[in-house]
Image (cartoon, rainbow, N blue to C red):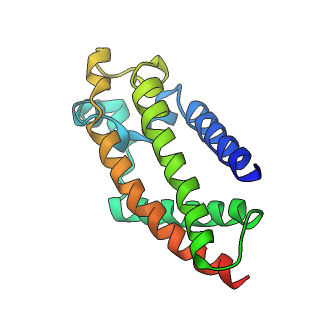
Amino acid sequence: MLFILETICLCLAFWGICYLGTGTDEKNLKGLSAYPDEIQGQVKADPVLGAQVKTVSPAARFLSNLLLYTVLLLLLCFFVREDGFLPNFRNVLVMGEILNAFDFLVIDLLWWRHTKRVRFSGTKNRPKLYRNPKNHLLSFVKGILMFFIAAVMDGLILSLM
């Protein structure tokens, strides 16, 4: 039961962070890589917004997310740890992949694509442009690998505790 409660709280906290991390151009710029390529191009071409764009390599983004979620899932699964690698690996993997699926299905496909909070003021305000799910789908696929790696590392750590 604790595992389910932790997973629900994790998903809700993640949505809250996403909600609070949008709403202004400055906040939205932090997640620019999640936007459809056409919107990214408009933002980078805009004289005001383009000057504020900070580029992070995909490898650096993947590694920083891996570190963040490895630590976060380790802390959450510490309270439901079991004896042996396999049960701990399974718990971390299930929690991580549920978060990944929640992010893709609920946040990206249902909320993000339809909210006005993610729209940039300096771009053509055509909602249809924001609805291309390609970059969200790519993030979901990368998340599958990232949470698998985190589950291996956390499974090992938790089984040694």
Toward the bottom, the furthest residue is 160
Residue at horizontal 39 percent and vertical 24 percent from the top: 113
Residue 100 in the image: x percent, y percent? Answer: 48, 47
Quarter holding the C terminus is bottom right
Residue at horizontal 46 percent and vertical 29 percent from the top: 25
Q: How many marks?
A: 0
Residue 118 visible from this viewpoint: no
Residue 120 as seen in the image, left or right of residue 132: right
Residue 57 in the image: x percent, y percent? Answer: 34, 60
Question: Where 88 sits versus 53, above or below?
Answer: below
- Which sits in the foreground, 127 or 73? 73
Residue 144 as seen in the image, left or right of residue 96: left
Residue at horizontal 65 percent and vertical 37 percent from the top: 12
Question: Where 7 sits versus 109, above or below?
Answer: below
Where on the picture, by quarter, is residue 108? top left
Residue at horizontal 70 percent and vertical 53 percent from the top: 3
- Which sits in the foreground, 84 or 106? 84
Residue 151 in the image: x percent, y percent? Answer: 53, 68
- Which sits in the foreground, 109 or 28? 109
Where on the picture, by quarter, is residue 87? bottom right
Where on the picture, by quarter, is residue 37? top left
Residue 56 in the image: x percent, y percent? Answer: 38, 56
Toward the top, the furthest residue is 126
Residue 33 as seen in the image, left or right of residue 111: left
Residue 80 visible from this viewpoint: yes
Question: Where 109 sits versus 64, above or below?
Answer: above
